Image (spheres, rainbow, N blue to C red):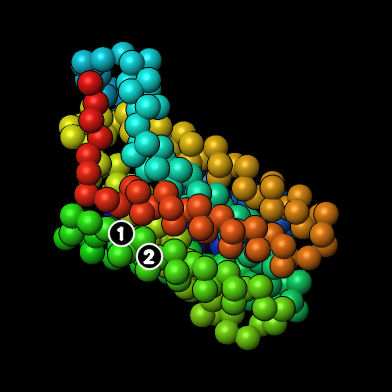
Amino acid sequence: MYSGMMGVGAALAAGVSVPLTEYLALGWRGALGIWSIPAVLALLIWLFQLQNVEKSSRNRSFRKAMKDLGKSSLAWKVALFMGLQSLAFYVVLAWLPDILQSRGMDSSMSGWMLSLSQAMGVVGSLVIPTWAGKYEDQRFLVWMLIGLEAISLIGLMIPSLWLVPFWVSAIGFALGGSFGLALLFIVLRSTNTETATELSGMSQSIGYSLAAIGPILIGAIFDVTQSWFYPLLFLFLIVFIKLYMGLGAAKPVSLKQK
């Protein structure tokens, strides 16, 4: 549900921002400024929830927990699978409209293609974890999602607009499903709530650090090569590392915390 709501918000923003810019004459600053309104509303809602927050007791220190997790190959595989998924997701979020516009698509339609991708991500983030939760071993789902992502990237490397709706839908579903699966791994590979909290902190810290680097790195590759083929090729190569990490994270084993 958490990943699904995030996807709904991203899909709505991607599709509506360009029409706000063009039809309401807000300009790109005004269109982006509109999205500060739900952010402020969310802040106000959370401020009222602070009085209900209760601190839970911990059986071990943060340093001890991170030391134990740092020695676990399983923890690193879960964290890096989430991190590489986040990198690819935010690269697509940041650069897909530019990629499509370089092929001749207008700005409004490219925004709707991004919205389509995000909407399919919502579907993936809801369907895949539900499906995965029925099995102890999720490796077949990792193969399916990574294969779908790889095929989509190959499709987007083709310098034409042929089958673009299919490619963006497929990569959106794959990345949304991978995100939901990454969150599920945190729960499935933990033996208790405290371990799950620690693994979640490690995974999301690594995940969003890589997510922050991804769009900048891809933009730099484009600046050097002046072609979107090479940035997409880079993402395609990352897929193989993600596959290795995902297969390790999907094995039916649990973290052993001291």
Name the residue carrying label 2: 143
- Any part of residue 48 in sight: no
In the displayed structure, would residue 242 be above or below residue 156? Answer: above
Residue at the image position 33 percent from the left and 16 percent from the top: 64
* Quadrant of res 127: bottom left
Residue at the image position 23 percent from the left and 21 percent from the top: 258
Name the residue carrying label 1: 139
- Any part of residue 190 in sight: yes
* Quadrant of res 110: bottom right
Where's residue 136, x and y in %? 18, 55
Mark 2 nearby-residue class (10 Å; few <14, some 14–19, many ≥20) = some
Q: Are marks 2 and 1 in contact (CB under 8 Å)?
A: yes
Going by the image, does 250 lie left or right of 6?
A: left
Amino acid beneath label 2: Trp
Residue at the image position 40 percent from the left and 27 percent from the top: 70
Going by the image, does 206 lie left or right of 107?
A: left
Q: Which residue is more in the foreground, 214 or 191? A: 191
Going by the image, does 32 lie left or right of 144?
A: right
Where's residue 168, x and y in %? 54, 72
In the displayed structure, would residue 237 be above or below residue 254? Answer: below
Task: Say which element carries label 1.
Answer: helix
